[in-house]
Image (tube, rainbow, N blue to C red):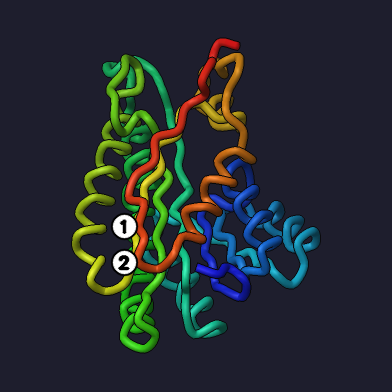
Amino acid sequence: MNLEGKVVVITGASAGLGAHFCNILAAKGSKVYGLARRKALLDEMSLELGAHFKGIECDVASEMAVGTAFKTILDAEGRIDVLINNAGLGIFGPAEDVTMDEWDLQMNVNLKGVFLCTRAVLPAMKAQNDIHGFGGHIVNISSVAGLLGNPNISTYNVTKFGLKGYSEALFKEVREDGIKVSCFYPGSIQTDFFKSAGLPMSANPMTSEQLGSTLIHVLETPDNYLITEIVMRPLRPKG
């Protein structure tokens, strides 16, 4: 896909990986719509990135908010070429200490949010395929925690294992509609994720720039070439 002029929607856009993805795709000439709850940060990004970026305040766990956000984008652009389901969070600790609020929050953001945003974009992408012969590309940002269970992250594991299953099923469902589905499984990344989760960062993590270069490569592949899954890890996480 030639990314210049393409309409890209990125969730969890106000910080970390999401903010970096917005930057590099805007630099490619895409029309980037960033969805996040923190409007002030989105406004700062709009000033920095200019006409190539528009921030929309949106809680991806809210069906009404997601519906409104995607209607706004489709009314303005008439299409969506790329959806990057990046919003996610982790609350770590022993299984017996997980509260219902912590369980629900992770399920709602990490799984329900992906479901709602994907459901919102599929009709438009299928219509685009009917007209142009190619529907678009959905990229789900999971984690190595979607491949391997570990102590004290059981709820987070559930959400990321669920995202793996959803991505695999969706890929098989929509491939004949000209829609690509790719799922990324990164290990430790140098963002605020681990600080928010209350865990120490590894000494030598990957960077947002490294993941961003992989994202661009995957999005720019030819229309009939699909990379369904990528596992990414730091070679020497301890330095």
Residue occupied by mark 1: 115
- CA distance for labels 1 and 2: 6 Å
Could you say which is closer to the camera, residue 37 or residue 186? 186
Q: Secondary structure at mark 2?
A: helix
Q: Position of residue 156 (x, y in %)?
A: 35, 31
Q: Tell me whether the residue at label 1 lies in contact with that at label 2, contact meaning CB atoms closer than 8 angstroms.
A: yes
**Quadrant location, the C terminus:** top right
Image location (x, y in percent) of residue 152: 35, 17
From the viewer's perspective, is residue 45 above or below residue 2? above
Residue located at (37% from left, 30% from top): 144
At mark 1, the secondary structure is: helix
Residue 232 in the image: state x and y as whole percent. 45, 33
Establish if 29 lies above or below 147: below
**What residue is shown at x 19% (from left), y 63% (from top)?**
173
Left/right of residue 24 with respect to residue 57 in the rendered view: right
Q: Which labelled disc corresponds to residue 29?
A: none
Residue hosting label 2: 119
Q: Residue at x 41, y 54 (%)?
A: 139
